[in-house]
C-alpha cells in the first residue's frame, strides 16, 4: 500500500491551491446541496476532509449536524482543527486516520461525505473504504460524494499521478449502486447520492442495465451562495491590491475599446468598475454576490433590464465558470450593447486549481462560438491559458479602435 500520509502531507504543504475554498469540489458541492442536506440531523463525517472547508460549512447555522472529519494527512488535520476552532456550536471532532478502518462504531453517522478522494486510492483500498462507509452509516443515513474520472494535473512525490484509479462513470456507478448519479462532462466528475434503507431489504438482482450510468447531465450551476462563501473565506479573492482582480489587471489591454457608459458583468467587489471610473468613464457593475453596495445584484445569465442604457460591457474571467445554457444567456445580454470586452480561460490545462472552471473549451472552440454571435475585432493572448476578446454586436462599425 502506498504511503498516503507522506504523499498528502507533501501536497498540502507545497501546493497552495489545496488550501483555497475556491478549489474545493466538496465545498462547492455541499453549498449547492444545502436544500437537500439541511433536513438532516445527527452526526456527519467527511472522509478526506482536507483543511476543513466542508466541515466548516456543515458546522454552520444552516444545519443541525455534529461534524466529524478524518484525513490521512496530519498536516491537513491541523489546518482543519485551526479552521474550526472558533466555530460556535457543538464540538467538532477532527482526527488523523491511522488505518483504513474508520475509528467509529457501526451505524454511527446520519451523513457521510467524501469528495474527490476515492480516485486517489489504489483499487483494493477503494473497496475497503466503501465497506467502512456502509458499516458506519445508520439505517436511513445518506452518503453524498464525488469522484473524478480523469487523471490529475499533479503528480505525487514519487512521480505517480495523484489519481491512482481513473475509471469510467459506469465503473463507479456499478461499484456504488447509488440512488442518483450525475456526470459533469466538463470536469469529468461524477456526483453520487446513496440512501441507506431504514429496514434491511434484499438486494435487487443485477441485470445488464444495472451497471449503466444515469444519463449524463450537468451538475447544478454554481450558486450565489457558493461564491459568497468563497469571498467570505478568502478576503483577498478578487482584491486588486493583491493582484487578484483580473478586471483591473487587464484594464490596459481593453480600456481603449470602451465607450461609456460601461457595465461590468460579474464585477465581484467592484474594483474594476472603480478603475474604469478613474479613467473618466461612467461605469457600473452587476454580480450575484452582494460585496459592494454601489453595484447591482443580479444574475448575469438572465435578462438585465437596464443594460440597453449602456454602450459597452466588460466581463473578465467569468464565462469559463458558466455552463453552455448560461453562456447563451450571457451572450444575449452582451447583444444589448455595442461593444464587448471579455476574457476567458481555456480548457486545455487539466490543472487542479481550476475546479470552478466548469466550461473547458479550447480557444478554437471559443472562437468558433463567439464568432457566431459577435464580430470579433481583436483577440489578445494574455497567457497560454487566457485570452481577451474585443467584439461588437454584428453590424456596428469598428471606428475608434
Image (cartoon, grey):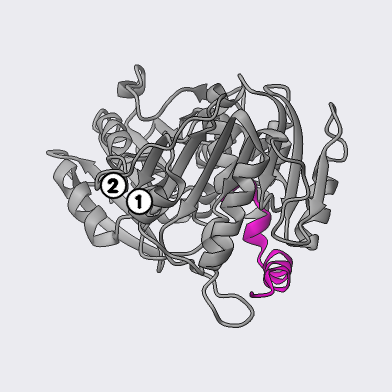
43 in relation to 359, above or below: above
Q: Mark 1 points at which residue?
A: 186
Please report the residue visible at 49 percent of the width from the left and 68 percent of the height from the top. Answer: 153
The residue most toward the front is 202
Vertical order, 206 against 163 (above or below): above
Alpha carbon separation for disc pair 1 and 2:
20 Å
Q: Is residue 244 visible?
A: no
- The residue nearer to you, when weighing 278 against 219, is 219
Secondary element type, mark 2: loop
Residue 207, by quadrant, is top left
The vertical placement of 366 against 299, above or below, is below
On the image, which quarter does residue 104 sit in? top right
- Residue 233 location in percent, x, y? 70, 40
Nearest the eye: 169 or 393: 169
The residue under label 2 is 212
The residue at 26%/28% (across/down) is 336
* Residue stretch rendered in magenta on the structure: 1-23
Identify the residue at image location x=30%, y=50%.
390
Amino acid at each position: 500500500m502506498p504511503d498516503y500520509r507522506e504523499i498528502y502531507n507533501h501536497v498540502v504543504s507545497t501546493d497552495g491551491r489545496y488550501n483555497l475554498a475556491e478549489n474545493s469540489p466538496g465545498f462547492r458541492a455541499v453549498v449547492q446541496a444545502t436544500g437537500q442536506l439541511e433536513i438532516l440531523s445527527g452526526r456527519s463525517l467527511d472522509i478526506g476532509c482536507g483543511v476543513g472547508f466542508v466541515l466548516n460549512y456543515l458546522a454552520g447555522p444552516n444545519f443541525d449536524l455534529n461534524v466529524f472529519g478524518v484525513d490521512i494527512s496530519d498536516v491537513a488535520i491541523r489546518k482543519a482543527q485551526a479552521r474550526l476552532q472558533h466555530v460556535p456550536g457543538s464540538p467538532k471532532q477532527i482526527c488523523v486516520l491511522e488505518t483504513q478502518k474508520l475509528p467509529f462504531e457501526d451505524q454511527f453517522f446520519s451523513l457521510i461525505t467524501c469528495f474527490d478522494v476515492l480516485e486517489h486510492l489504489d483499487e483494493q483500498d477503494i473497496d475497503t473504504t466503501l465497506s467502512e462507509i456502509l458499516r458506519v452509516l445508520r439505517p436511513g443515513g445518506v452518503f453524498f460524494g464525488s469522484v473524478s474520472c480523469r487523471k490529475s494535473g499533479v503528480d505525487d512525490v514519487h512521480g505517480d499521478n495523484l489519481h491512482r484509479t481513473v475509471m469510467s462513470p459506469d465503473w463507479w456507478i456499478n461499484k456504488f449502486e447509488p440512488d442518483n448519479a450525475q456526470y459533469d462532462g466538463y470536469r469529468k466528475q461524477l456526483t453520487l447520492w446513496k440512501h441507506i434503507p431504514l429496514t434491511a431489504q434484499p438486494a435487487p438482482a443485477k441485470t445488464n442495465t444495472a451497471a449503466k450510468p444515469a444519463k449524463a447531465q450537468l451538475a447544478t450551476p454554481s450558486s450565489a451562495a457558493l461564491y459568497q462563501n468563497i469571498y467570505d473565506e478568502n478576503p483577498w479573492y478578487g482584491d486588486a491590491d493583491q493582484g487578484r482582480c483580473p478586471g483591473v489587471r487587464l484594464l490596459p489591454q481593453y480600456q481603449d475599446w470602451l465607450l461609456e457608459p460601461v457595465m461590468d458583468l460579474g464585477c465581484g467587489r467592484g474594483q474594476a468598475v472603480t478603475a474604469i471610473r478613474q479613467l473618466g468613464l461612467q461605469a457600473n457593475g452587476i454580480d450575484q454576490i452582494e460585496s459592494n453596495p454601489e453595484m447591482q445584484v443580479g444574475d448575469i445569465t438572465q435578462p438585465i433590464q437596464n443594460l440597453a442604457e449602456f454602450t459597452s460591457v466588460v466581463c473578465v474571467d467569468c464565462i469559463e465558470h458558466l455552463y453552455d445554457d448560461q453562456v447563451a444567456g450571457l451572450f444575449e445580454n452582451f447583444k444589448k450593447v455595442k461593444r464587448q470586452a471579455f476574457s476567458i480561460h481555456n480548457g486545455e490545462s487539466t490543472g487542479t486549481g481550476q475546479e470552478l472552471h466548469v466550461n473547458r473549451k479550447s480557444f478554437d472552440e471559443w472562437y468558433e462560438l463567439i464568432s457566431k454571435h459577435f464580430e470579433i475585432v481583436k483577440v489578445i493572448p494574455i497567457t497560454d491559458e487566457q485570452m481577451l476578446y474585443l467584439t461588437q454586436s454584428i453590424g456596428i462599425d469598428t471606428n475608434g479602435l
